[in-house]
Image (cartoon, grey):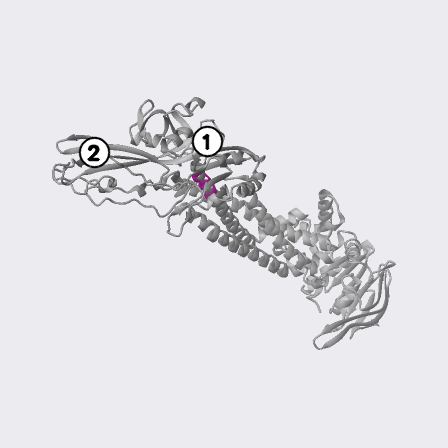
Amino acid sequence: MFGTYLYRELSNRRKQTAIIAAGMALAIALVMIVNGVAAGVRDAQSTVLASVYGVGTDITITQEPVQSAAGTEGAEGAAPERPRFEFGAEDGETTDGTTALSQSRLTSGIASITFDADALATALSLDSVSAATATLALTNVSFSGEVAAPTTTDAAEPGSGAGEGGAAGGRGGPDGAGGSAFNVDTFTVVGIDVGGESVGPLTSVELVDGRAFESSDSDANVVILDTSYATTSSLSVGDSLEIGGEEFEVIGTVTSTSADASTASNTYIPLDTAQRVAGLENQISTVYVQAASSTDIASVQASLQAELPDASVKTQEDLASSVSGSLSTASDLVVKLGTWLSIIVLAAAFLISVLLTTSGVSRRTREFGTLKAIGWSNGAVVRQVAGESLVQGAIGGVVGVAIGLLGILAINIAAPVLSGSAAATAVAGQGGGTGPGGGGNRFGDAASTAAATTDIALQIPVTFGIIGIAVLLAIVGGLVAGAFGGWRAARLRPAEALRSVA
Amino acid sequence: MYELSELTKKYETKRGPINALNKVSLNIPTGQMVAIQGPTGGGKSTLLQMLGALERPTSGTVTLENDELSGMPDSRLAEIRARTIGFVFQGFNLIPTLTAQENVETALAPLGLSTSDRRSRAQAALEKVGLGERLSHHPTELSGGQQQRVAIARALVKEPKVLLADEPTGNLDEQTRDEIMDLLEGLWRDEGLTLIIVTHDSAVAKRAERRLHLKHGSVTEKK
């Protein structure tokens, strides 16, 4: 009887059923899409973070810059240095009054603070740490160009900076009028522990050509290139590349495991080699830590912070907030607008459902009164009302899930591109200088050290969790409306059925 | 069947308390056909609600086959209504979304019968009131007289001991009224029911073995 009555009621009161189901469906679809977009944005953030921090990294340790009174960096670790090129009077080859000069320097760059490598040992000494590795983020700056050959009357003073090199070319020079021309080329270099750790930047890349690092490469001048950088620089395995004034053999090329993301650096060299060439013995810039389990992350973070009070110890969750760009805007939008919109629509749908159900009970007063008069118990009447509401909610749920899935499919097909970047170390205040002469440079362009700007097509994952939430909401919506309607029906006195006659 | 003792029912209104029933004492033997008449507001419907275990008295007692109804919990009263008492209403009170057969089946739902048993009994009840050909019709597809027949089938399908009818012919024309009363009277005789009818219609009341008059909450026998 319950099923027959329920079917007859819902099919004969189609308008009410459609309104309640439509409201519920709209709310559920919206919640699904907002939750899905939030998950998609989280995935995108993880992709951006993984491109910098690698896969499996739970915690990173870096050195925070500390502003000194003069406004420049000062920290417990080594302050970043600006590359400086010095040329002797005999350097370069002079032809027709023009001297060709070339020099490259490997420095910790202007976006990276280095600190003592003992931090790695500290991390590895913790019981809840399953793996840890250290890297040294560097910038290679190459200077190459032509300057007017110095004369006895207009030679630059010894020790003047690169920007001043072409200050007063009197005659000759590349432009034939005593001027100068030079190029400054920068690329990022990350020193990697070749021990094959399970964490770190190389965990998010895959080998395209050549080979990976081996233990025997520990202090060798070998380099692995990001494929994009290799392509733009016309380099391939077996070629040589000058880093910090030394020749390196290209042994492999890598690309990001994510189709969307770029790798963390243009080039990778062994950590010991990086420290030696850059003159930063026993210095590192980041420690990547993997906790034994996800439940240990908070305690490991606390322990590391206690052991390394001057360091910046951050979890992936902390780092997610460092992702900038339209990805960050999307995240804010989803969290703030999307969540509130979902709550409002959901509340409205629940309210409509409750109001229509209770007004339906009021309209059916005589019907329920009659049923009670012929022997239906309160429980049976309440079950009938609640059952109808639950089914209306379930219809809304099914339609809502379908609409939600279509919405998600539409977004996945449209695949809006979000860009995000995450810098391993962010240092402000150091731009490059511009030489006053015929040349100049902007070392500020090298500020992308150990950072990855990534364009990611938003893809919303369809998970059982998202569908589960939708189904749960449909059931809860039906139960809430059913509870109110049932409560109202239970309070009806059976004598109402006879009220029509005085 | 029924024994009413000092039965009083008061309603609180904005204009003060109203005594719908005032110390009514009454015996209704099993198998009797009783008509209750009286002016509007005289307490007829209130008395019927007391007899039907739909309302509790303010004071006094209603005893149905040795069961004192006023002190019973709601669940037990619902059980008595489900098994012992049948109702017929002036407005028929059929559920508009259900067919004639399904409407009759609603009376069997509380008894926990199997679906097939419920259906066959509902069909038999409808055939008994002359609606064997109208099983799948909805109330809106039936005339007033036919709707009241469905309501009578619904009241009788559970084989109650008492049938309470509240103005059962109030919404019907004379010819249909007589048909319905013939039907009720026939069922009363055949089934051995106790039939209690509230009516304004003297023609209906005259068919009863016993006539009661209710005015200002007090009952008197009418010859």
Q: Quadrant of residue B113?
A: top right
Q: Quadrant of residue B19?
A: bottom right
- Which secondary structure type mostly characterizes the magenta part of the structure? helix
Dividing the image into 4 quarters, which one contains the N terminus of chain B?
Answer: bottom right
Magenta part of the protein: which range? A41-48
Q: Nearer the viewer, mark 2 or mark 1?
A: 2
Q: Amino acid at mark 1?
A: Thr
Q: Which residue is mark 1?
A: A203
- x, y (%) of residue A108? 37, 37
Label 2 vs 1, first from the N-terminus = 2
**Label 1 crowd (10 A; few <14 / some 14-19 / many >=20):** some
**Label 2 crowd (10 A; few <14 / some 14-19 / many >=20):** few
User: In terms of secondary structure, where does tag 1 sit?
Assistant: helix
A90 relative to B99, above or below: above
Q: How many marks?
A: 2
Residue A100 lies left or right of residue B103; in this view the side is left
Residue at (50% x, 35% y) in the render: A120
Dividing the image into 4 quarters, which one contains the C terminus of chain B?
Answer: bottom right
Residue at (43% x, 22% y) in the render: A216
Q: Is residue A106 magenta?
A: no
User: In terms of secondary structure, where does tag 2 sit?
Assistant: loop
Residue at (87% x, 62% y) in the render: B29
Q: Is residue A56 visible?
A: no
- x, y (%) of residue A46? 46, 40
Q: Is residue A231 visible?
A: yes
Q: Chain under label 1?
A: A
> Which of the two residues, A274 or A358, is positioned nearer the viewer here?
A274
Q: Which residue is mark 2?
A: A89
> Which of the two residues, A131 or A334, is positioned nearer the viewer here?
A131
Q: Amino acid at mark 2?
A: Ala
